[in-house]
Amino acid sequence: MTTAIFPGSFDPLTNGHLDIIKRASRVFDKLVVVIGINASKKSLFSISERMKLIKDCVKDIKNVEVDSTSDLLIKYASSINAKVIVRGIRDSKDLDYEKPMDSINHDLNSNIESIYLLSRSAKNYISSSMVKELCHFGGDISKYVPLNVEQSLKARFAGEL
């Protein structure tokens, strides 16, 4: 059984993230979506809020779990016996960002492989940061995020959450 992890901040989850999750879930026996906890990064949604939003979106995908960690990603992967780290690539900037991390991860544990999935849709090029900014200024984000995420973002910016 091959376990893979798909790490990210997911603040918030986008349709691009969801596309990678769905595609990776068809390739691996088990996929764990891992929210990385970075104390130095200011997040819009708490870890528990992000976990709930993601769980709601993947509830019908039987081999997907959601977790969080504040540990080094490669240590977390080892702790759950994951053999693969899945990363989504939107453009050459993402690839340039991922290459050094892959080298370090390989140095730390050469038994865990990184696999990169390319974005398939122009809508997948949008980032979580762009979605938050667009929503903050009243733009239409419905094309870029699942409905539950859209509703939560709008409520957050309206001061309801």
Image: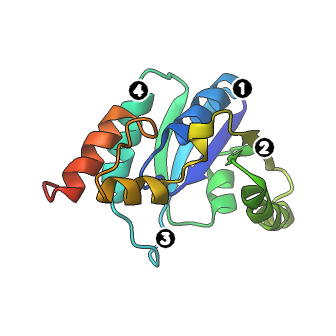
Q: Earlier in the sequence, mark 1 or mark 2?
A: 1
Q: CA distance from mark 1 to mark 2?
A: 11 Å
Question: 88 or 114, which is in the foreground?
Answer: 88
Q: CA distance from mark 4 to mark 1?
A: 18 Å
* Residue density around tag 2, few if under 14, some if 14–19, many if 20 or more, within 10 Å: some
**Residue 150 makes an appearance in the image:** yes
Label 3 element class: loop
Q: Earlier in the sequence, mark 4 or mark 3?
A: 3
Q: Amino acid at mark 4?
A: Lys
Label 4 element class: loop
Question: 78 or 54, which is in the foreground?
Answer: 54
Q: CA distance from mark 2 to mark 4?
A: 24 Å
Q: Which residue is mark 2?
A: 115
Which numbered disc covers residue 27? 1
Q: Amino acid at mark 3?
A: Asn
Circles 1 and 2, Cβ within 8 Å, touching? The answer is yes
Q: Amino acid at mark 2?
A: Ile
x and y percentages locating residue 79 in the rendered image: 63, 53
What residue is drawn where x is 69% and y is 48%?
90
Label 2 element class: strand
Q: Which residue is mark 4?
A: 59
Which numbered disc covers residue 38? 3
Q: Earlier in the sequence, mark 1 or mark 3?
A: 1
Question: 19 or 51, which is in the foreground?
Answer: 19
